[in-house]
Image (cartoon, rainbow, N blue to C red):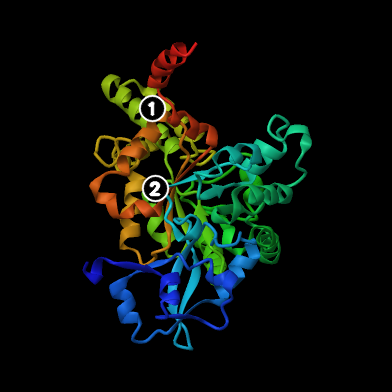
Amino acid sequence: MEAINMKCSLEALVQSGRLQVASDTGKDMFDRVKHITLPFKTEMKLGETVKAIGVTDEFRKVINLFQVPAGETPAGFRHEYVYGADGSMRINLVRDISFGANGVRRPTNVLFSANTANPFSVYTMRNFIANLTTNPQIIYDSFLNNPKANKNNQFKDRYEVLKELCKIVGPGVDISVEVNNPFAEESALMEEIAQFEEILTPYRLVVKVPHTGPLNADNVDSFLSGKYPAVNDGKPEDFFYGHNLAYRLHEKGYRVNFTLMAEPYQTALALTAKPYFINAFVERRHIHTQGLSSLLKRLDETGDPMYREQIHAFMLKSDMLASDDTDCEAAEKKARQIVAYRGLDTADGHDGLDSARHSLRLLKQANLPDTRLILCNTKSAQMYYDIDKMMVEPEFADMKQRVILTCEPEYFGQFTSSPTIYTYQRSFLNSVK
C-alpha cells in the first residue's frame, strides 16, 4: 500500500516511538487528542523536525473551563496544529461552531440557530443547533414577561435565563445577546457586556449591535412617541453610531453580531466594522416589496389616484417615510425605486433573497474569513423552501459554511414532517394492531 493512502493516529506514533508526548502534556490531555489521525506522508515529513506532541495552554484552558469529559474535546472548537517553541507539534483549540465534539465537523455546512430565549423550547433542538440568537423583545416580551412561556415565573431576569441556556446547549453553541439600550453611556454598556461574558464565557458570547439609522439618545423618545424623520434623513454620527460601537467592541476582543440589516446596500459598510455575524432580514422586506408592487400595478392599470394614496399609507405603516410625510406623488416615485431595486421580477429577487445573495457575494470578496451571514425574519413555509433551494445554487457552493439560518424551533419543526408520514404510518400502525 502506498504511504500516501495510509493514516496513523497520534497514539500509534507515540506507541511506535516515532513521537513522544511533550513533558508538559499529561495523560488526561493527550488522551483527548490521541485519536487524531494524520496522513502517513505528512507524518514522515513532520518526523524530520518534530519529535514530540503536546497541547497548548489555550487547549488546557478550554478543557478546564468547560469541564469536558475525559477523552473528549468540546463542540464548538476545531483542532489547530501549531509549532511549539520547543520544537514540538501542539494541538490548539480554536473557536469554530462548524465543529461538533472531538474536532468533527457538524453534519451540514449550513448551520441552524434557535431564535428564542425560551429554555423549554431550546431544549428540543439543543443537539441540532450551532447558534442561538436573542434580543430584548425575545427575552422580555416573548419569554420573561409571558406567563404562558415562563411557566410559574420560574425565571426572574435575563441572567437566570442565560445561565439556563448555557446548561442546555453546552460549550458548542454561540449565544448572541443584545444590550437593553444601545444609546447608554459606553461605560454602562461595557458593564452590561461584562455580565454577559461572565455567564456565557468569551467563547460563547457574541455581542449583538444594531444598526441605528438616524436615531440617537436625544431623539429616541420622540421616535417612540411616533415622531421621526425619514430613515435616510440624519447625521453621519448617528448613521455610523452602530458601526463605531461594533468596531470598538471588535477592537476590545469581542465578537459582534451586527444586526438590523435588510437591504443589500447595508452589507459593504457593515463589513468594515469587522463583525463576526452580519444579517439579512428577509421575509418582512419581501412582503413589503410584494405589497408595493401590487399597488403600483393597480395604479398603472386603472390610473385611480386612490391607489397612490394607498401606496403612501402602506409606506407610512412600513416605516418607509417620515412620520409627518404627506406627499403621495413623492411616495409613489420612491415606491417605484424600491421595487426596481429589489428586483422582484429577476432571478435574484423573485423570492425576496436578493439581500442574502448580495451579502454572500460580498462576503466571498471580503477579507473576513470568519464572518458569517445569518438569515433571519423567516415566517412562511415558502421562505424556508426558497432558502433551502438557494443554498444549493452552484454559485454559493463554496459559501455554505458561512450561512446560519435562525428562527424559532416551532418554525423549524414543520419542516421535519410531510403528508407521506400519515400515509405510511397509518398502514404500518394498522398492520400491528
Depth order, front residue of 179/88: 88
Residue 429 to residue 283: above or below: above
Disc marking residue 108: 2
Residue 333 seen: no
Indicate the position of residue 336 as horizontal and vertical percent values: 32, 37
Displayed quadrant of residue 82: bottom left
Q: Secondary structure at mark 1?
A: helix
Indicate the position of residue 368 as horizontal and vertical percent values: 39, 65
Categorize mark 2 by other alpha carbons within 10 Å: few (<14), some (14-19), many (20+). Answer: few
Residues marked 1 and 2 touching at CB (< 8 Å): no
Residue 135 to residue 29: above or below: above
Residue 21 to residue 241: above or below: below
Categorize mark 1 by other alpha carbons within 10 Å: few (<14), some (14-19), many (20+). Answer: many
Measure how far apart labels 1 and 2 are at the Cα level.
47 Å
The numbered mark, 1 or 2, whose residue comes first in the sequence reads: 2
The amino acid at mark 2 is Thr
Displayed quadrant of residue 303: top left
Depth order, front residue of 98/394: 98
- The residue indicated by pointer 1 is 308
153 left or right of 288 in image:
right
Displayed quadrant of residue 417: top left
The amino acid at mark 1 is Arg
Residue in the image at 63% along x and 43% along y: 117
